[in-house]
Amino acid sequence: MKQFLYALTLVPAVAIAQQDTTKLHEIIISENRLQTPFSRQARNIQLITKEQIAQMPVKSINEVLSFIAGADVRQRGPFGTQADISIDGGSFEQTLILLNGVKISDVQTAHHSMNIPVPLAAIERIEVLKGPAARVYGINALTGAINIVTKASKQAAIEVNVATGSSFGQKALGDGSGIYKGGAAQVAINMVGKNNQHLFGFGITDYNGQRYNSSTYDHKFFYQGNVDFDEKNKLNLMGGYLKNAFGASGYYAAPGDKEAFEIVETALFAMGSSHQLSKGFSLHPRVSARYNWDDYRYFRNNLSRARSLHQTGVWSAELNSTLHSAIGDFGFGLESRSEDIKSTNIGNRERYNHGAYAEYKTEALKNLLLNIGTYVNYNTQYGWQAFPGLDAAYLFAPKWKLAFNVGSSQRIPSFTDLYLKQRPGNIGNPNLTSENAWQYEVSLQHKLANFNVQVGYFNRHISNFIDWVRNSSSVPYQPQNFGDNKIQGFNIGLGQTFSLSNQSSLAYQLSYNYLHAGKMSYANNITSKYVVENLKHQALGSLVYRCTNWQLTIGARWLERELKSPYLITDVRLLYGKQHWNVYADATNLLDKEYIEVAAVPLPKRWFAIGANYRFGL
């Protein structure tokens, strides 16, 4: 089956009110070790800042990511209930999720990787690194990585956001028992001392569901602490907890799962430090842990039948170092990671992963940025492998940059891929081998204070590609290695900000992606569980108009997936704000479209909400 994938994508417009767009260049992308200003990156990295998030008509991290060029967000439930994230035509298992540089992707299944215990009010920015990221982050970053960075302000403050909304007349499907409605509240508290900073984030969401058995309730807590013992020695702490309970009708086994219910709990912890041992040499050790509990109830009112319980644990220790010298910067590091699961239908499993990296960055040659390195990995199931990579960029003429990247990457099968026993719907395959990829990309960028344009091309070749398939509806889906998967794409993007008067301005962003997927070797009677939903066309747009204290944001997403009908979703936010507060009104899916992103879960039609945000210093 030959697939053609296209995308017209837009990054959210740069914030207009109280923001100088040149400040974006001051953002430092650390990638856990070598620090590089965003403006001097040779990689394809896209950012969404806290100012942009505040403008957008969104309610969750999942919805924020749906405005990233090339990112495919497929939600099973709205308001952050559950979502699969993929990049540039890859699968949802091939994207690595990180929080402040700590890997938090789920080892049971990537369906749980977006269980992130951070409210939007506590987010500083979201970094999306497209292309193979194994040289930077190790395994499972085959098509890219998403790093969520939380706030670390030196100003003490409290920020409160509350919102409520309703479908206003849309009855819940199935039993038609009432109007679809709900609300959410978030609090971010930033406390600052002489040598320390502490961020506390709280969030709660409660919606009764847009159809039968689709309610969602979650609460989350997040803490981040930074302590400076002196100029050379610093400590950072991070912890979080999320509990999400939701009706799961149609999520995995429609139509028989009409009464399904799921409860997911996620806890994480990380402790790291940085030590400047000499003028040019520093060490950065860190330990982290993530636990996830998944309670899936096929019959929510009968726990004695078809109930699946899973508990996963991940422990990781790493040591990163940097050496600054006259000929450039060097990075060295080690990582060790243990993964285990205790499950009623996967069994008790464990495996270990050990990695080491070395990289070199230099600007010794005039106007040339060069970063070269490799990550060497050993996994107790799949043995040794190395992931070399090269990033280069040439700065020519004022504000022009030509960049080239090439690298390899790997995705190790999840525990669900390997061992799941869930007949009659799905079974694992313990004989799977890991997915391996090579990708190269070239891009040309031009940036001014109020205008930017970028064109690029990439080519990716994945060997031992994994897909869940079956040859009859009477047998379960099972993952198989299906040989080569080749995707290439061309993209172009531009954005501009206009000053209409002393009190008004207009900003837009436009981009276009063309993705072409090579032929996959499926027999005529083979049905794919995920490839049939691969993105073919994607068009995203955003427009921000500001006049005095008023601001209007319009965002539109047009998508078509393989064997699916296209749909257009238009969202609007009208905001009125002063220095410390604002009120806003959102209209989501303004055109009242019916659409499904994944599985058999129709997402909400037209939805209205009002909210308020208040921030005050301490």
Image (spheres, rainbow, N blue to C red):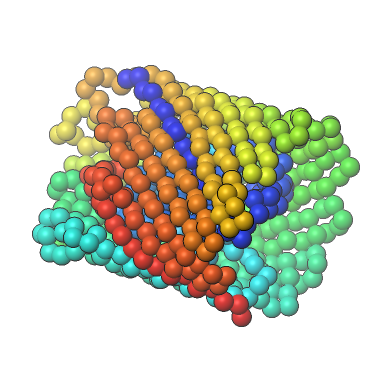
- Number of labels in the image equals 0
27, 433: nearer the viewer: 27
Q: Which residue lies furthest to the right in this view?
A: 326
Above or below: residue 360 compared with residue 200: above
State the residue at coordinates (32%, 20%). Answer: 1
289, 220: nearer the viewer: 220
State the residue at coordinates (52%, 64%). Answer: 549
Q: Residue furthest front?
A: 501
Q: In this view, does 359 lie to the left or right of 289?
A: right
271, 10: nearer the viewer: 10
x then y, percent, for residue 439: 56, 28
Q: Which residue lies furthest to the left in this view?
A: 175
x then y, percent, for residue 567: 30, 38
Q: In this view, does 172 lie to the left or right of 406?
A: left
State the residue at coordinates (68%, 45%). Answer: 449
Above or below: residue 592 compared with residue 468: below
